[in-house]
Image (cartoon, rainbow, N blue to C red):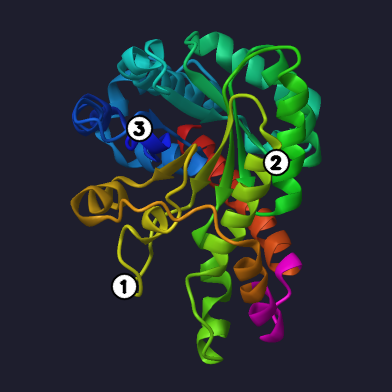
């Protein structure tokens, strides 16, 4: 736990085979991170650009492209889970996440089957199965968590999505005691609207934070057993904000922030350790009003971000499979 008194954790939003044996271990040994997340885009970058996978790939020529991908990804997830296991064993998170096939996002039964299969194949207790927050996903989350499989609900941009995830996890908690996280994407919202806000003299880099803060407030108020909000999409693109901005401004009790390695390094070097959440509901609404008065319909922005997020993971997954064909 990075800030133990606040139960605030930093997880690395990055997986790559060589890194796992070097920088990953170092970040853990220094007490900086206590978990990790992955997604199809992360694995695409690792598998298609790192030479570390070539030796294993040479042994997988008889497999389909998806089977090759899973073999590579499972090996990395197992390695990360083994490195994190001492933290898990002492109750200090120690989780690593792997996402189900993004093309299953509208099929609850297939998502459940894949989640069960992946968790069984990896065969480590400290692995979270990532499930996108769709109508089918909520059903899958409840079922998987109810079976005792840790779940990371992902691609969450709206209060509605978050509350449906919380409801699924609350129902699952009646059947099984398992850790879950609700992953709220932050910076993508700001990148979608900041140009419009800047032109009208309205503060930028704030809507994503306040949207995430609103979700945090509402989820925390529900007291779902063993469930935390995780802030994702917290890297900074461009030079308008300091590199650790989306960690600094979302520092909250009982939360996780998963971030790129460069963002984590920047936070460790000079980040703010002051708790910033919970935020006042009135101040959140005031900024919502300013954004609405600027002609931005947040419901449309959020819908667009959900669709683009799912599409981006599908594209990355397709590119991996095509390259492994």
> Taken as a whole, is the magenta stretch helix, strand or loop?
helix
Sequence-wise, the earlier of marks 3 and 2 is: 3
- Report the disc number at residue 4: 3
Mark 3 to mark 2 CA distance (whole Å): 29 Å
In the rendered image, the residue lying farthest to the bottom is 200
Q: Position of residue 214 (x, y in %)?
A: 63, 56
**Residue at point 36% right, 61% down?**
245
Query: Does 292 appear in magenta?
Result: yes
- Report the disc number at residue 239: 1
- Give the residue at mark 2: 133
Q: Secondary structure at mark 2?
A: loop
Q: Position of residue 209 (x, y in %)?
A: 52, 61
Q: Secondary structure at mark 1?
A: loop
Quick one: quadrant of the N terminus?
A: top left
Which residues fall within the magenta stretch? 288-299
Sequence-wise, the earlier of marks 3 and 1 is: 3
**Residue at point 69% right, 54% down?**
158
* Residue 125 against residue 244 in the figure, above or below: above
Sequence-wise, the earlier of marks 1 and 2 is: 2
Q: Are marks 3 and 2 in contact (CB under 8 Å)?
A: no
Nearer to us in this view, 121 or 228: 228
Q: Nearer the viewer, mark 3 or mark 1?
A: 3
In the image, is 102 to the left or to the right of 320? right
């Amino acid at each position: 736990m990075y800030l133990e008194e606040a139960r605030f954790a930093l997880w690395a939003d990055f997986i790559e085979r060589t890194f796992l044996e070097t920088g990953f271990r170092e970040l853990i040994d220094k007490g900086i991170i206590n978990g990790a997340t992955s997604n199809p885009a992360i694995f695409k970058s690792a598998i298609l650009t790192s030479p570390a996978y070539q030796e294993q790939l040479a042994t997988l020529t008889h497999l389909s492209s998806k089977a090759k991908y899973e073999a590579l990804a499972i090996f990395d997830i197992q390695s990360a889970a083994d490195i994190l296991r001492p933290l898990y064993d002492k109750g200090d998170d120690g989780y690593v996440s792997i996402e189900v096939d993004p093309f299953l996002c509208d099929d609850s039964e297939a998502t459940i089957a894949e989640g069960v299969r992946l968790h069984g194949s990896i065969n480590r207790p400290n692995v979270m199965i990532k499930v996108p927050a769709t109508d089918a996903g909520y059903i899958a989350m409840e079922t998987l968590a109810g079976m005792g499989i840790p779940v990371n609900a992902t691609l969450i941009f709206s209060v509605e999505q978050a509350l449906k995830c919380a409801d699924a996890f609350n129902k699952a908690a009646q059947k099984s005691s398992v850790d879950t996280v609700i992953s709220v994407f932050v910076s993508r919202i700001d990148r979608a609207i900041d140009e419009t806000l800047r032109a009208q003299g309205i503060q930028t880099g704030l809507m994503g934070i306040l949207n995430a803060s609103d979700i945090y407030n509402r989820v925390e108020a529900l007291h779902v057993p063993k469930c935390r909000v995780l802030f994702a999409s917290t890297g900074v693109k461009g030079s308008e904000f300091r590199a650790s901005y989306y960690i600094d401004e979302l520092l909250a009790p009982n939360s996780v922030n998963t971030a790129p390695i460069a963002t984590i390094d920047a936070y460790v070097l000079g980040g703010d350790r002051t708790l910033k959440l919970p935020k006042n509901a009135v101040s959140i609404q005031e900024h919502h009003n300013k954004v609405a008065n600027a002609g931005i319909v947040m419901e449309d922005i959020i819908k667009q971000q959900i669709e683009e997020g799912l599409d981006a993971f599908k594209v990355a997954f397709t590119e991996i499979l095509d390259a492994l064909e």
